[in-house]
Image (cartoon, rainbow, N blue to C red):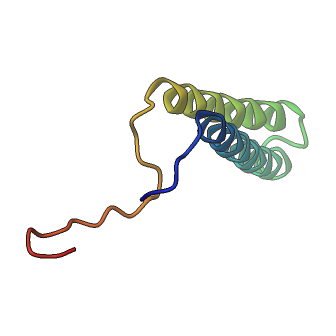
Amino acid sequence: MAAEVRSEDELGKKWDRCLADTIVKMGGGLAVGVVFSVFLFKRRPWPVAFGTGVGLGMGYSNCQHDFRNPNLLHGTFVKKIEKGEK
Protein backbone atom coordinates (compact mmCIF):
# COMPACT_ATOMS: atom_id res chain seq x y z
CA MET A 1 0.00 0.00 0.00
CA ALA A 2 1.11 3.50 -0.69
CA ALA A 3 1.77 5.80 2.23
CA GLU A 4 -1.03 8.26 2.88
CA VAL A 5 -0.22 11.91 2.32
CA ARG A 6 -2.02 14.30 4.61
CA SER A 7 -3.39 17.54 3.22
CA GLU A 8 -1.46 19.51 5.85
CA ASP A 9 1.77 18.05 4.52
CA GLU A 10 0.87 18.96 0.93
CA LEU A 11 0.05 22.52 1.97
CA GLY A 12 3.32 22.74 3.90
CA LYS A 13 5.27 21.54 0.87
CA LYS A 14 3.56 24.15 -1.30
CA TRP A 15 4.38 26.94 1.16
CA ASP A 16 8.00 25.80 1.39
CA ARG A 17 8.32 25.67 -2.39
CA CYS A 18 6.61 29.04 -2.70
CA LEU A 19 8.83 30.82 -0.17
CA ALA A 20 12.02 29.30 -1.54
CA ASP A 21 11.10 30.27 -5.11
CA THR A 22 10.20 33.82 -4.07
CA ILE A 23 13.45 34.28 -2.15
CA VAL A 24 15.51 33.01 -5.09
CA LYS A 25 13.71 35.29 -7.55
CA MET A 26 14.05 38.32 -5.26
CA GLY A 27 17.76 37.59 -4.84
CA GLY A 28 18.21 37.35 -8.60
CA GLY A 29 16.33 40.59 -9.13
CA LEU A 30 18.42 42.27 -6.43
CA ALA A 31 21.65 41.09 -8.07
CA VAL A 32 20.58 42.26 -11.53
CA GLY A 33 19.47 45.58 -10.02
CA VAL A 34 22.84 46.09 -8.33
CA VAL A 35 24.70 45.35 -11.56
CA PHE A 36 22.56 47.79 -13.54
CA SER A 37 22.83 50.39 -10.79
CA VAL A 38 26.61 50.22 -10.63
CA PHE A 39 27.41 50.00 -14.33
CA LEU A 40 24.64 51.90 -16.12
CA PHE A 41 22.85 54.30 -13.78
CA LYS A 42 25.66 55.92 -11.75
CA ARG A 43 24.79 54.19 -8.47
CA ARG A 44 21.15 55.24 -8.33
CA PRO A 45 19.00 53.15 -5.97
CA TRP A 46 15.93 52.69 -8.17
CA PRO A 47 17.28 49.79 -10.31
CA VAL A 48 17.88 47.78 -7.13
CA ALA A 49 14.35 48.41 -5.88
CA PHE A 50 12.89 47.71 -9.32
CA GLY A 51 14.77 44.41 -9.70
CA THR A 52 13.77 43.25 -6.22
CA GLY A 53 10.15 44.18 -6.89
CA VAL A 54 10.11 42.30 -10.18
CA GLY A 55 11.50 39.22 -8.41
CA LEU A 56 8.86 39.52 -5.68
CA GLY A 57 6.12 39.84 -8.29
CA MET A 58 7.33 36.78 -10.18
CA GLY A 59 7.46 34.75 -6.98
CA TYR A 60 3.97 35.89 -5.97
CA SER A 61 2.60 35.00 -9.40
CA ASN A 62 4.14 31.53 -9.24
CA CYS A 63 2.68 31.01 -5.76
CA GLN A 64 -0.79 31.98 -6.94
CA HIS A 65 -0.50 29.55 -9.83
CA ASP A 66 0.71 26.77 -7.54
CA PHE A 67 -2.11 27.21 -5.02
CA ARG A 68 -4.87 27.53 -7.64
CA ASN A 69 -3.89 24.37 -9.57
CA PRO A 70 -3.88 21.56 -7.00
CA ASN A 71 -3.55 18.73 -9.53
CA LEU A 72 -0.08 19.55 -10.83
CA LEU A 73 2.80 17.13 -10.31
CA HIS A 74 5.93 18.93 -9.16
CA GLY A 75 9.13 17.18 -10.05
CA THR A 76 7.85 13.69 -9.41
CA PHE A 77 8.63 10.74 -11.61
CA VAL A 78 5.61 8.85 -12.84
CA LYS A 79 6.39 5.36 -14.03
CA LYS A 80 4.10 3.80 -16.58
CA ILE A 81 3.34 0.19 -15.75
CA GLU A 82 2.74 -2.11 -18.66
CA LYS A 83 -0.06 -4.65 -18.49
CA GLY A 84 2.24 -7.60 -17.86
CA GLU A 85 4.40 -5.92 -15.17
CA LYS A 86 3.83 -5.60 -11.45
Seen at 74% across and 29% down, the residue is: 53
Give the x, y percent position of residue 30. Answer: 79, 45
- In the figure, is residue 34 to the left or right of 82? right
Seen at 57% across and 28% down, the residue is: 61
- In the figure, is residue 31 to the left or right of 17? right
Closer to the camera in the image, 45 or 12: 12
Give the x, y percent position of residue 12. Answer: 69, 39
Please state, as top left, top right, bottom left or bottom right, where the C terminus lies in the image: bottom left
Seen at 83% across and 48% down, the residue is: 34
Closer to the camera in the image, 9 or 29: 9
Give the x, y percent position of residue 56. Answer: 71, 32
Give the x, y percent position of residue 60. Answer: 64, 28
In the image, is residue 76 above or below residue 73?
below
Q: Quadrant of residue 8?
A: top right
Q: How many marks?
A: 0
In the image, is residue 84 above or below residue 71?
below
Closer to the camera in the image, 82 or 26: 82
Q: Residue furthest left?
A: 83
Q: Residue furthest front?
A: 1
Q: Quadrant of residue 85?
A: bottom left
Q: Quadrant of residue 51?
A: top right
Please state, as top left, top right, bottom left or bottom right, where the N terminus lies in the image: bottom left
Closer to the camera in the image, 68 or 83: 83
